Amino acid sequence: MIVLSIGSLITAPILVLLSTLEAPTNINLSSTAPVPALEIIKTYGSLAGSECYGRTAPPASSCQIPLSDLKKELGVSNKSGIKSLTRSEFANRLESLSFQWPLKPYGLTDTSYTKTAVMNKGAETAMYMNELEKRGYDRRNPTGPLPTSLRPKLNEELKREGIDPRALDKVFYSFSGNQEELTSEQLENAFRGSDFLDYYSFIELIGKNEIVWPSY
């Protein structure tokens, strides 16, 4: 610490203040305003794959995020030789992935979760329907297509829209533990000893209060 030579005018409170100013500050890098739920859906649906509790998710749907697959997608696996990713590099990797609307885990037990692919229920159904209706879908038309059949088209449109940078921040810093670079070890910590994240555990990782939920 640099001490200013001002003789007897230096008092204890001033010294304490100077020490405080020089101390490193641990800043929460994800402390931005909450982001719209749709943007979190976009991030999850880009990172998640077809693995679905031992089954395969229906076409145009995503289900779980296997830790091993995520490391490969982001390029931080042991074989890649890349030790870490910056936030910008993470964003570029994420935006290169395809988007599939995620499925909602079915039931509340491990046994019922295995039925998720068969039940084929999309996460945040009201939001999904709202996105369809914004694009001209009429749920009151009895002869119209089934909502699930429109997933491929909606996936394409949401992919073209891109992801809000604030949502990328939330996910990156949730994975990295608020560090400026993301490593394989930090991903393992984020998964908390599990080999997979599902939609519910992903939302828990981000924090429900960090997301703006629509009221339909």
Image: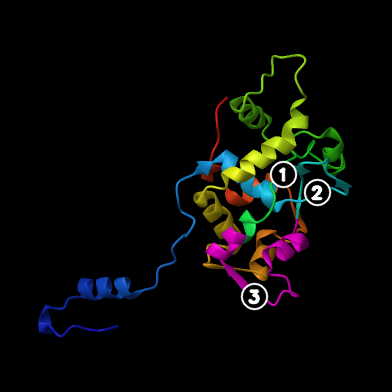
Q: Is residue 164 above or below residue 74?
A: above
Check disc 3 and report its element: helix, strand or loop.
Answer: loop
Report the amino acid beneath label 3: Lys
| Contact, mark 3 vs mark 1 (Cβ under 8 Å) | no
Depth check, front residue: 108 or 169: 169
Indicate which label's residue lies in the foreground, 3 or 1.
Answer: 1
Q: Earlier in the sequence, mark 2 or mark 3?
A: 2
**Residue at 73% across, 35% down:** 151
Report the amino acid beneath label 1: Gln
Magenta stretch: give its range.
Answer: 66-92
Report the amino acid beneath label 2: Ser
Depth check, front residue: 1 or 63: 63
Q: Position of residue 29 (x, y in %)?
A: 47, 60
Residue 107 lies in quadrant: top right
Instruction: Kindly identify which numbered label has been placed on residue 21.
Output: none
Q: Alpha-carbon neighbours of circle 1 within 10 Å: few (<14), some, or many (≥20)?
A: many
Residue 72 lies in quadrant: bottom right
Depth check, front residue: 93 or 214: 93
Instruction: Kindly identify which numbered label has been placed on residue 50.
Output: 2
Q: Position of residue 104 (x, y in %)?
A: 74, 38
**Residue at 27% across, 73% down:** 16
* 106 in the magenta segment: no
Residue 74 lies in quadrant: bottom right
The chosen color scheme is rainbow
* 72 in the magenta segment: yes
Instruction: Kindly identify which numbered label has been placed on residue 83.
Output: 3
Q: Mark 1 sits on what residue?
A: 100
Mark 3 vs mark 1, CA separation in Å: 28 Å
Q: Earlier in the sequence, mark 2 or mark 1?
A: 2
| Contact, mark 2 vs mark 1 (Cβ under 8 Å) | yes
Check disc 1 and report its element: helix, strand or loop.
Answer: loop
